[in-house]
Amino acid sequence: MKFLIDMNLSPDWLDPFAAEGWDAMHWATVGEPCATDDVIMKWARDNAYVIVTHDLDFSALLAATRAIGPSVIQVRTQNVLPDALRIVLINAIKQFRRELEEGALISIDLQRARARVLPFE
């Protein structure tokens, strides 16, 4: 599984992914920093990446288009730095690995992680 870290999250997130042996890249190394969410989603879908973001617009786009991918991990906390959220995020990826591989939206906060399979019904 490969992960694309959105512009609204720090490139510092690359280290926790690498520590787990997961391929991850930050959008700043892929495309224009001001790219629209549609552009980012298309790139992620075309290249089989899971988007990791703090942006709620990705879930709205998935719902509006009834898309089956790409999978999105949505961080829903105020402190989005790796030191605050690393364990929760890593555990959620491991818990919902199958769903992410098949197409899902994973919402994460400090207390829990939830999965919704795509497309949304």
Image (spheres, helix red, strand yellow):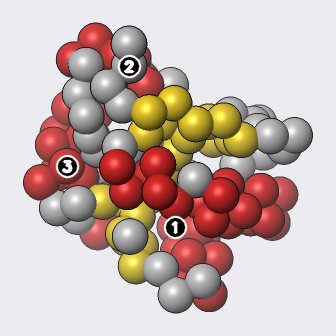
Task: Mark 3 and mark 2 in contact? Answer it, CB < 8 Å.
Answer: no
Under circle 3, the secondary element is: helix
Q: What element does badge 1 sit on?
A: helix
Q: Comparing marks 2 and 1, which lies closer to the viewer?
A: 2
- Between the C-alphas of marks 3 and 2, the distance is 17 Å
Q: Secondary structure at mark 2?
A: loop
Determine which residue is flagged by label 2.
120
**Residue beneath disc 3:** 45
Image coordinates for residue 54, horizontal then vertical, percent: 56, 38
The residue at the point 24 percent across, 52 percent down is 44
Numbered disc total: 3
> Which residue is label 1 attached to?
11
Residue 71 position in % (x across, y down): 37, 45
Taking 12 as reference, is 79 above or below it? above
Q: CA distance from mark 3 to mark 1?
A: 21 Å
The residue located at (36%, 69%) in the rendering is 2
Residue 8 in view, yes or no? no
Q: Which mark, by number, is residue 23?
A: none
Cα–Cα gap, marks 2 and 1: 30 Å
Instruction: Categorize mark 1 by other alpha carbons within 10 Å: few (<14), some (14-19), many (20+).
Output: some
* Amino acid at pointer 2: Phe
Residue 103 vs residue 26, the one in the foreground: 103
